Image (tube, rainbow, N blue to C red):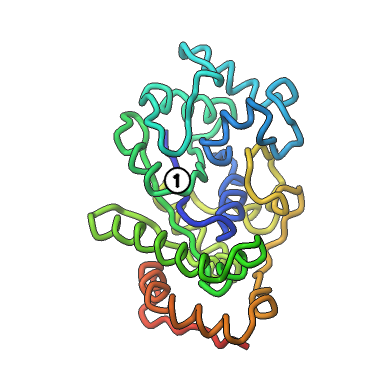
């Protein structure tokens, strides 16, 4: 089973990319696998509106597929900092794929440490994809959630370095700038799908949400049936002039590395205005 594993920070475009990929007829997006136990405990809901397993036909089908493989959804102890049984991990990906009739699964668990734990699971082909935003946009998200701009600066630099270190160690990661995904969606999606052996379908950028959606967790604003691709540049109004300058100076170096990894030879950061 092919697993498209999305790396990135929260509010960096991970849910949008997941929805776009999951609209393909041969791909299913289930959200972050770490959310499965939370869903069963009623702490996360499904994008279809279900708040428990009994309310969602899709996740019931996944559970049935797992039972045919000798386990069940409530046996999956996924989560950050946990070393999941390789058999259960493989059974989960195979079951969600079978329930959707898909040949590839999208997992938006996002963290590098979780990716590393999946590398030791036989029978799955990991396809890591890193999505990142302009650091000023990421800092604005931190500010909107009640954290400081300094938190945004630190998280952006730390997560980016950890992902880029994987490149240095020989991992094959596809890097995508959120801004490129919004302005050139077909091109960016094909970069991922080339690794899956599929061609982009127009619905992935023209009719996002046209397929049944059963993502667990993720950005609630991107759960609807009529998701529009819209470049969010609200950071220009949300951050003060001083904050913009601070973030640009602090994160420009790591942003440049991200952009080069995404295929930009001579990236130039846009103005603060």
10 Å neighbourhood of mark 1: few (<14), some, or many (≥20)?
Answer: many
At x 64%, y 58%, the residue is: 205
In this rendering, is residue 6 above or below 260?
Answer: above
Label 1: element kind = strand
- The percent position of residue 196, horizontal first and vertical second, equals 42, 46
Q: Residue furthest left?
A: 169
Q: Disc 1 designates what residue?
A: 5
At x 33%, y 31%, the residue is: 121
Mark count: 1
Q: Is residue 141 left or right of residue 3?
A: right
- The percent position of residue 46, horizontal first and vertical second, equals 69, 36
Quarter of the image containing the C terminus?
Answer: bottom right
Q: Is residue 90 left or right of residue 272?
A: left
Q: Is residue 146 left or right of residue 167?
A: right
Quarter of the image containing the N terminus?
Answer: top left
In this rendering, is residue 82 above or below 91?
Answer: below
Residue 268 found in image quarter: bottom left
Q: Nearer the viewer, residue 264 or 147?
A: 147
Q: Nearer the viewer, residue 202 or 211?
A: 211
């Amino acid at each position: 089973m092919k697993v498209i594993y999305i790396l990135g920070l929260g509010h960096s475009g991970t849910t949008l990319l997941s929805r776009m990929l999951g609209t393909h007829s041969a791909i299913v997006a289930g959200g972050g696998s770490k959310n499965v136990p939370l869903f069963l405990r009623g702490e996360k809901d499904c994008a279809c509106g279900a708040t428990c397993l009994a309310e969602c036909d899709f996740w019931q089908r996944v559970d049935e597929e797992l039972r045919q493989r000798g386990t069940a959804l409530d046996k999956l102890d996924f989560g950050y900092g946990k070393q999941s049984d390789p058999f259960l991990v493989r059974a989960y990906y195979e079951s969600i794929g079978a329930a959707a009739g898909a040949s590839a699964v999208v997992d938006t668990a996002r963290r590098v440490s979780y990716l590393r734990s999946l590398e030791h699971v036989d029978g799955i082909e990991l396809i890591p994809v890193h999505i990142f935003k302009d650091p000023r946009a990421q800092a604005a998200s931190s500010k909107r959630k009640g954290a400081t701009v300094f938190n945004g600066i630190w998280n952006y630099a730390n997560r980016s370095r950890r992902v880029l270190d994987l490149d240095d160690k020989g991992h094959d990661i596809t890097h995508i700038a959120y801004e490129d995904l919004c302005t050139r969606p077909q091109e960016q999606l094909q970069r991922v799908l080339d690794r899956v052996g599929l061609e982009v379908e127009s619905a992935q950028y023209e009719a996002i949400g046209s397929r049944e959606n059963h993502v667990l967790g993720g950005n609630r604003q991107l759960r609807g049936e009529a998701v529009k691709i819209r470049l969010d540049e609200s950071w220009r109004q949300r951050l003060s002039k001083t904050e913009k300058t601070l973030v640009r100076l602090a994160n420009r170096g790591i942003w440049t590395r991200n952009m080069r990894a995404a295929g930009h030879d001579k990236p130039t950061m846009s103005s603060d205005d």
